[in-house]
Image (spheres, coloured by chain):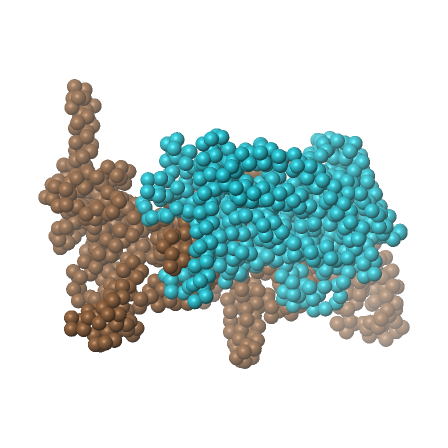
Amino acid sequence: MIWRENLLLHIKLAATASASLNSQSERKERESEMVGPKYDCLANPLGAVRLTFEKAIASGADPASFDGKDWGAVDLFRQFLFEDGALSHVPILNPTTIKWVQPNTLVRFRGMIQDMLGNEFYAGAYKDGSVWRTNKFMDVCQYPMGSSPDMRIWERRLLYCVPVPGQNSWTESLSEVAMNKTSQQREKRQRMEDDASNHMDLVLVDEFESSPSVKKMRENGHASPSSQSKDSVIEGTSNTNFVTNAERNSLPCLVKIYDCPESELKLNEVFEFVGVLTLDSDVMADKNDQDESSYGFIEDELVHLPPEKVPRLHCLIHRKLDVNDFLHSSPMMEPKPQLVKETRESLLRHLTSILGNDGIAAHLMLLHLLSRVHARIDNVAVGKLSLNLTCLSKESVSVFGNQIRLSVQNLLPFTQCIPLTVNYLNTASLAPKKDYQTNRLIPGVLQLADGSHLIIDETQLETGTLNSTGVENARLLKNLMEFQKVEYNFEYYKMEMIADVQMLILSEGKSNIVPADLVIPFQPSSAASFEVVPAETLEAWRWYLASVRSLPHSIESDMQKVVESDLVAARQADRSLGGQDLSRLLTMGRLMSASFGETSLSLEHWQMVKELERLRRERLK
Amino acid sequence: MASDSGFPSFNDGPSSPDDSISTPIDNTFSSPAGSSRASGRGRGGGRRRRRSTTPTAFLTPRANQSRFATSSETPNTTPSRSNRRSNGQRHATSPSSTDDVPLSSSEAGDDMDEATPTFVWGTNISVQDVKSAIQMFLKHFREKEELLSGSESEIYKEGKYMRAINRVLEIEGEWIDVDANDVFDYDSDLYNKMVRYPLEVLAIFDIVLMDIVSLINPLFEKHVQVRIYNLKSSTAMRNLNPSDIEKMVSLKGMIIRCSSIIPEIREAIFRCLVCGYYSDPIVVDRGRINEPSTCLKQECLAKNSMTLVHNRCRFADKQIVRLQETPDDIPDGGTPHTVSLLMHDKLVDAGKPGDRVEVTGIYRAMSVRVGPTQRTVKSLFKTYIDCLHIKKADKSRMLVEDAMEIDNSHPRIEDEIQFDESKIQQLKELSRQPNIYETLTRSLAPNIWELDDVKKGLLCQLFGGNALKLPSGASFRGDINILLVGDPGTSKSQLLQYIHKLSPRGIYTSGKGSSAVGLTAYVTKDPETGETVLESGALVLSDRGICCIDEFDKMSESARSMLHEVMEQQTVSIAKAGIIASLNARTSVLACANPSGSRYNPRLSVIENIHLPPTLLSRFDLIYLILDKADEQTDRRLAKHIVSLHFENPENSEQGVLDLATLTAYVSYARKHIHPKLSDEAAEELTRGYVEMRRRGNFPGSSKKVITATPRQIESLIRLSEALARIRLSELVEKHDVEEAFRLLEVAMQQSATDHSTGTIDMDLITTGVSASERMRRENMVSSTRNIIMEKMQLGGPSMRLLEILEELKKLIPGSEVHLHDLRNALTTLASEGFVVVHGDSVKRI
């Protein structure tokens, strides 16, 4: 009979929760009457939703006209978050914040769409007596819902989101700032609830009081994360960062999206969702009962996602995240030519020192870090530039490999590293696979967000036999390298998903498993130097990489002619040059000019690329 | 009464507007007349429906009689009536479908006069109307072909569904399948009602059906159900939305999971534990069975004594199936959607995981309660589809049922992918474009530019020729085999990959990784049972498809020899381990090979370049040389192409190109439905052209005979021209198809079979590997060598060194170059004649 007691407890909890909610909302309503449309969108977003709904109904709108549409609630929040600048006040959901964030409050979640669980139908609007109520943005209706004919069934999409794979710790510091701040708010909220009599004034006063302090906090926050990242550079030779990252990032989230065209949200894209958090465990309380067989028959994939582990977020507003959004400094610099050039120089110096004074490799590395797929024509992914550093032995890789990995980690937001061994190939599940038992997409290593960086360390590879999994995995890696596509395994068929992953291969000889675009024998002249990079510089580099990468690019017609005749000449001289080689040259040209912050290819940069290519070829001989 | 009322209401229609126009004074009159006409029409419709209550015995013969009259065209039998009877149905219903709502209301008004109508709850659909409409449909529906071919024996046959009902009665079946297209053709109003209110209309359908059944055979006990299939439009799974709830929908998808079979209780019988009284069967009511709280026996009336008797209850099978979207419906960056299907009775286990099916059913939503003890309902709904009908579709992307299928005269209708009307129209529209051939060529691998003739050849391969099987047993393949030979880096492999992606059941293998058994078939021992089993290889697996073999030249000798049989006989014969079998391998082979040196040596023949046995080479219909010429022009074009790839908007670079899906649909439609025949003109052209080709070998004044064409070429030509006709979706091979086929063959031959020393086409190059001119040269060489040896050496005398003879030869034949290996060849010939003995470098006459 324990479960019965539990159930009772649940019911009680639910009852109190809804009661407190009701009182809160009533309070809000009273407040709105007095101060006009001023809602506490942060603490009681559902109240705001309800008020706008009631307002819309009161103004004579038919609930049927809200099918798949918004009645103004989202606009309210958009204004609140972006125009009033409240976005930074909204706590970011992560394993630390989840412990204290209250359900039914406004939260943010940043993550990658890992799986789509289809659509969900819910009673969107219904009549409770003579009053229209809405269930939008919530899981359980708060008012009794009879089976009245005046019920509108609406739909929402379920997205299963996870923290971006390989997300580096520096991207998160911002959330800690937010956390400190919101914990303060939470105190405020508790205080508010303690004395309910004169809460109203308090809210207003608090709001004013807190805002400057928040600002202060933010300023402080700037210094602290950067010093932290400095630390990680200094003592970051160990692998510990990795593990903690994975643990810290393990919070997935089930996002419910309303009224949004399907094409807007795609698999593997990185988004920030702002919405109402619900943790209602009572919804799933009926899962252990078996007598309800007529209801149990419909598969419920949500069974495998208990709300204690996977919080629900009813999304009000979502926006696609750029690398820039992960930088701490707000758009700090205009891409001024001088500034870009300086940053480029310093970054190049840094790369050169990391690579043991190998200038050519550093140049190529810079181009590689800037590459992205900017167009797809049939099977050709234009713009990718994978790099293969050869002549790295097992010994040297422990020195340089680690250095490279760490600096890439510090420069790019999402990085991963695959130690390629026979055993790894034979056992790892690289491709995502659909599990029809749970109806979920099981993530694979290669399910990566666009713009991820992948280091493949082939130096540990020894001779051995690949089993069928190994062969399949090798093929997957090769396909990713060549076409920037990953085959997802849906058991009965495979589906190709496009990807945009920068791939860096460290190997002893030229890698044949993953043939890269650019092969360069690595020739260090000195040991890698451990230099301490100031946080501001690091930040500037990140900003540089992120903004330069997204620059548009074009070519003047006379320059086009020059390039064409150069290509023809190159091909006349060396018949072994194929279309791919020429294409790579053009990619390099594009990236070279982009690295100077320019949007069209100039002769100077084209010459640089040709020179670079000549040096590289010389070294290959 | 029926015919009378129908007749004026119809005549009324066309005549009254004429009146209003001719007499403008009547204008004031015309508007009420019009309105009365409208209502009259409505009433006519209503009466027509009601008419169906008249006994069938009366209706059926009359209908037949009138159609008979039409077909024999006797003018004095009432033409209006016959017109109305035969296709008047369609006339009468077409207006009703457009102004659906007012009509049904007027019908309802009509019915009000006679009896109080029953309406479907919440709608204005009258049960009686629907009932009579269904009755009419079931009794009188005939297919179009039946109506058109009005032969006497057909006329007296019953309607399609009456026959179906009779058949069901005979076999004691439990359902009849009703094609929704038929319903639409007969009565689009009924169709709309059925799709919009399926629950109610289907219930009426079942009632009507049972009425008819009991009329025919009152003793028939089984409950016969209607299963609707083939709706006019099918919904994409991801487009299902709340407005589809409680509607009839049709979905395509793939079954991914089936639950075990769940027995669902239908009727329960309870027994009193006290007195042993058995209750009457209690039927399930809204998913629940009310357990009697007291014994129903008057004498007992014990409380809480009733217990369920399991083995006397009636159960029905139930199964829950998950259906997932087919990969083609998934947009970019999406994952497939799934939906649950609820299957009952006979539909259970109708499909298994992996099957592609088309499902017709009712989309339903069910509210989820928070807990078993709680009344509050969660705001969520679980959706599922109550399945009515399930149809399996073929698994392959491009269905090909043509090649070699002529002996099979029964087309399997059920397994076919149905092209819907609009799609066919679209494809036909496409085929009427004058430049369809060019458009298709351009659409084939658009990112590989140039190589237009190669692409045209590949296009022909995709479409394929007609396979022919003579009654005598001889068969001619319709598949076109193509070999691409060329320098590395000329996108051969890309072409192969592309064709592989496009082709039905294509298999892609690399020559180096394929063994003979891997290509054909092999016998293995099953690890579990120890039985010998036959495993199919790539060629057998790509039966009716295209087998793409990369690196053909690197294939082992034994593997290649297996191809001989496949490429001409199109079978794979196995005789080992007690299994003697001949498997079908009706596959087109698309192979590509690299020259044996890294580059193609234009001075050598194809055979010498790729080291393939001539016997195999001659089995390729088309052999293309894709050479990377050091030509600045092509290089420039390549450079331009790559630059535009990088800097221009990729959309505007290539225009008028069909997308892959359309191309696939086009090819599969053509392969399936178009079987072109040679026209007389085309046959003549073929003969003429072939003779011409043969004649080209005879140079005026030349004694040597060069073979420029062989019978294999004429077969190839026929295949090519058939494929070309197919490209135009034409059933007739025209003269210009043949001309184009000749051109294609010539282009391919010119590249591969040109004898470089004379510049003419020489089929001997392909068939034997040695051109006629080369043979002449070799003969010359042998005779001159013989002369030299005769001159310089005595029988049994001292031996001579090779180089000395070479010097002599060069003196003898001053103009041409003489190589050491030529001399060696000549000496080998002489040695085989027993004229000389060659020991290393020294030659001795014997």
Seen at 66% across and 37% down, the residue is A213
Seen at 24% across and 70% down, the residue is B303
Q: Colour of chain A?
A: cyan
As drawn, B7 above or below A499: above
The answer to whether one can see residue A197 in this image is yes
Seen at 37% across and 48% down, the residue is A144
* Residue B758 percent location from the top left of the image: 70, 51
In this view, which residue lies farthest toward the left? B1
Image side of residue A511 versus residue B418, left or right: right
Looking at the rendered image, the quarter that the N terminus of chain B falls into is: top left
Count of marks overlaid on the render: 0
Q: Answer with the quarter of the image where residue A130 lies.
A: top left
Along the viewing direction, whichever of A95 and B562 lies nearer the viewer: A95
Image side of residue B720 versus residue B248, left or right: right
Along the viewing direction, whichever of A381 and B584 lies nearer the viewer: A381
Looking at the rendered image, the quarter that the C terminus of chain B falls into is: bottom right
The answer to whether one can see residue B95 in this image is no
As drawn, B253 above or below B536: above
Q: Answer with the quarter of the image where residue A68 lies.
A: top left
* Residue A559 percent location from the top left of the image: 74, 33
* Residue B264 percent location from the top left of the image: 33, 66
As drawn, A552 above or below A250: above
